[in-house]
Amino acid sequence: MIDIPSLAKELRVELSSFKSSTARVVGGAAPPPCIIVDKVGESTRIHDPHEYVPQYVSIGPYHRAADLAGEAIKVKYLGDVLSAAAASSTAPMTLEDYLSELAHLEHSVRRCYVHSFDIPSREFVRMLLLDACYILVRFGDVLTPRTAAPPQPAAAAAEEVAVANGVVHAGHRVVPTEERRAAADDQQMAVAVVRDVLYLAENQIPFFVVDKVHQLTFLDGETPVLDAIARYAHDLLSWTEYSVATPTIVAPPALRPEPADLLHLLHMHFTPTVLASGKVSRGGRAVGRWRTATEYHYAGVTFKRRPLSSGGGARSILDVKVSRRGGALQVPRLSIDGETWRLLRNLMALEQSNPSAAGSHVTAYCVFMSQLACTARDVELLSRRGVIVHGLGNDGEVAGLFANLCKGAVFDFDEADQNYLRPVCQVLDRRFRSRPRRWMASLRQKYFLNPWLTAGLVAATIGLVCTVIQAVYSVLSYVKPGN
């Protein structure tokens, strides 16, 4: 038996709610699309599932049940945040105040996730508070003395960023065994924290939760948490040579962009300058797939490294540039380490879940690189040109990782709104289809790269010209013997 009146009443309530939410945007501008946190699709996850799962600390509800270390550390960091609140105010917020404020945000936080969670409100609010405190202590300068001068942007987190990227400086002194072992443990923890908290698409909580806890901790409101975390993200990406952009710094009266979560904050650093300028080409011939670096090289395309520069040059690895006739392709150097693939894959996962809000420019770049460097010969060529730098086993291993980088991603090569590199592809495609240019390029590569072959070709050409002249004079002397 089905209770028809009750079911009809339930549907009427939902329909009324839908109509009221729709009526709020009628006659005005629709609200901007928001970033949601979603699980990575199985078609993408199946190729390398370890790239999307935290291994040290869980943030948010998706991996909350995982058997990971860090729960005791989160409680310790909660105590650090409460101590910082007590030190910065004569009437600090109590623990009950934190929980009460986050309880008011619970409904908004749950709406930021695609999936629903069977987590009681009590446990959900507890999770939000502990995770926000963990992020604030690790990346938000909560423990920095409030009277100290703010660190310089270029060196704010240099030491911690160096540790996070596998560099530990011990100076010229002899490090004792115990201290060296402790430094190694700190290094591994720093790498794990950056990997799990910043890079993973599923391991996130909304940024406004972190901001709310920070506001409750420092009631003066003069030190936005975005400044500290954005500075850390900038230093991290500059150290790894992925980006030198500063997307959170804008001149008034422009609105300051707010990240949805920490991975989205990193994603904001990877906006190509062609998209920031608003100059997107939509016309021209339809394009297909990219070709390999070796094929472009045989067509006469020269690969050059484009340096990163915040003064009008390339701002991130996505700023690929081609000459007007396609003779030179400038690509920012991609320094490959053990975390490169994890970062790129999770940035693509963010775009795949939020195509309207996040775009698809990182996906377009990854597709470009995965086809440009899909063989060992391509990686070897790009390495010689300074476009790729890696410390992996061999070029074939790197090529295999590039070839599998975009498996499961949905992407349209010929859609201008998705493929910001479409004009570059059109120029290179015209270059590749030009037979005279391919012939000249083949001639240069076969004969003009070796000086001995060049000298032999010049000598053979001179000999041929002399033979032709001698033959012409021989015929003329026979036809006109008197002359």
Image (cartoon, helix red, strand yellow):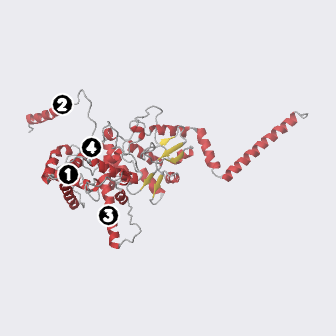
**Label 2 neighbour load within 10 Å: few <14, some 14-19, many 20+:** few
Q: Amino acid at mark 2?
A: Lys
Give the alpha-carbon distance from disc 4 to disc 2, as whole Å: 23 Å
Earlier along the polypeptide chain: callout 2 or callout 1?
2
Residue flagged by tag 1: what amino acid is it?
Answer: Thr
Q: In the rendered structure, which amino acid carries the disc numbered 4?
A: Ile
Quick check: marks 2 and 1 in contact, CB under 8 Å?
no
Secondary structure at numbered mark 4: loop
Q: Are marks 4 and 2 in contact (CB under 8 Å)?
A: no
Provide the residue designation for mark 1. 217
In the picture as drawn, the residue positioned furthest to the right comes out as: 482
Q: Nearer the viewer, residue 197 or 341?
A: 197
Residue mark closest to the camera, 4 vs 3: 3
Instruction: Kindly identify which residue carries mark 4.
Output: 36
Residue that appears at 45% across and 60% down: 393
> Residue 255, image x and y in percent?
30, 38
Point out the frontmost of discs 3 and 2.
3
Q: Which residue is mark 2?
A: 19
Label 3 sits on a secondary structure element that is helix
